[in-house]
Image: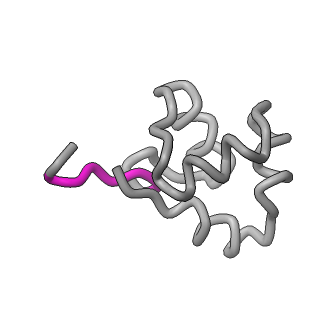
Amino acid sequence: MKNSIRIERAIKNITQADLAELIGVSRQTINTIESNRYVPSTVLALKIARVFGKPVEEIFDLEDTD
């Protein structure tokens, strides 16, 4: 699963730590999601999408291998 969290953070001008605080996780969790080493839970994906004001499908994209 790919994601556009890094791009969305840049647009909103927030750090990984800022996003982590907004959704109640560690900065390291945001880092592992951004680098595609961790697939977030549905709840976490919805929280991230809410911060950016976009549908989950605009933040996360399934790949053919998923």
Residue 9 drawn at (x, y percent): 69, 65
Question: Would you place residue 23 above or below residue 15 in this image?
Answer: above
Residue drawn at the location 50% of the way across and 63% of the way down: 4
Q: Taking 8 as reference, is 2 left or right?
A: left
Tally the marks: 0
Residue 55 drawn at (x, y percent): 46, 47
Q: Residue furthest front?
A: 37
Query: Nearest the camera: 4 or 35?
Result: 35
**Residue 11 sits inside the magenta stretch:** no
Query: Nearest the camera: 35 or 59?
Result: 35
Question: Would you place residue 64 above or below residue 39 in this image?
Answer: below
Residue drawn at the location 34% of the way across and 49% of the way down: 1
Residue 36 drawn at (x, y percent): 46, 53
Query: Nearest the camera: 38 or 48?
Result: 38
Q: Quadrant of residue 44?
A: top right
Question: Would you place residue 32 above or below residue 40 in this image?
Answer: below
Q: How is the image coloured?
A: one colour
Residue drawn at the location 56% of the way across and 56% of the way down: 34
Residue drawn at the location 55% of the way across and 25% of the way down: 43
Q: Quadrant of residue 11?
A: bottom right
Magenta-highlighted residues: 59-64
- Quarter of the image with the C terminus is top left
Q: Taking 35 as reference, is 21 left or right?
A: right
